[in-house]
Amino acid sequence: MYFIGLDLSLCSTGVAILDELGEPIYLSRIVSSDLRGLERLIFIKKQIEEILNDIEIECIAIEGYSYGSQGRAIFNIGEIGGIVRIMIFERGIKMMIVPPSIVKMFVGAKGNAKKEVVIQAYNDLYSAFFRKCDNDEVDALILSKIAYYYNHRIGITNSQYELVKKLEEKCEII
């Protein structure tokens, strides 16, 4: 059984997969910045479908909507979020919608921290070497770890454990 983290984005969706031991086995981005409208939505949908079809999944964590978006992007982000949520729900896979602030706090950053601060907090916590441009992958990794630890609750720091215990009240779990 695998655990997936999805950092949905119109231009660069982060995808991370952990195995049954919580070890990363896949890390990538779905880059769709050169597409627009329905072509972009269909492309992202097909890429995620391929991932969902290939493995047996225990839980998927998706970052919730950021309410800082403006203009037409609000509608486009809502469309891709809805499409992905429906795909996961129709497959009967457990899904967690994790607020962006929880994603940041999981690695010890403040809930309103900037991307580079979250990346540095992840690097410090996991002895990793991600760069600023890797923010989609880092968010996806954090989300996959949240999905894993929510279901296993072992091998995490005390503050992460307390955060995981609170996920049911802070997250939408379907």
Image (cartoon, rainbow, N blue to C red):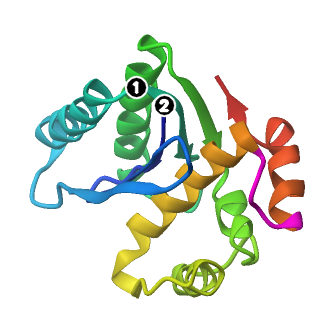
Position of residue 13 relative to residue 45, above or below, is: below
Verify whether residue 157 appears in magenta.
yes
Nearer to us in this view, 49 or 172? 49
Residue 17 drawn at (x, y percent): 41, 48
What's under tag 2, amino acid-wise?
Met
Nearer to us in this view, 16 or 63? 16
Please name the residue shown 56% across and 62% down the image: 68
Describe residue 81's horizontal placement relative to residue 30 as left or right.
Answer: right
The residue segment tinted magenta is: 153-158
Residue 45 drawn at (x, y percent): 24, 33
Please name the residue shown 44% across and 57% down the image: 24
Residue 107 drawn at (x, y percent): 69, 72
Number of numbered discs present? 2
Question: Residue 69, can we see it?
Answer: no
- Quadrant for residue 100, please give it: bottom right
User: Which disc number belongs to residue 56?
Assistant: 1
Residue to which mark 2 is pinned? 1
Task: Check disc 2: other Cα within 10 Å, few if <14, some if 14-19, many if 20+.
Answer: few
Question: Residue 167, can we see it?
Answer: yes
Name the quarter where the C terminus is drawn.
top right
C-alpha separation, residue under disc 2 versus residue under disc 1: 5 Å
Please name the residue shown 76% across and 77% down the image: 110
Task: Check disc 1: other Cα within 10 Å, few if <14, some if 14-19, many if 20+.
Answer: few
What's under tag 1, amino acid-wise?
Glu
Describe residue 77's horizontal placement relative to residue 23 as left or right.
Answer: left
Position of residue 122 relative to residue 82, above or below, is: below
Please name the residue shown 42% across and 20% down the image: 86
Answer yes or no: do the residues labelled 2 and 1 have beta carbons within 8 Å? yes
Choose the circle earlier in sequence order: 2 or 1.
2
Verify whether residue 34 appears in magenta.
no
Nearer to us in this view, 26 or 77? 26
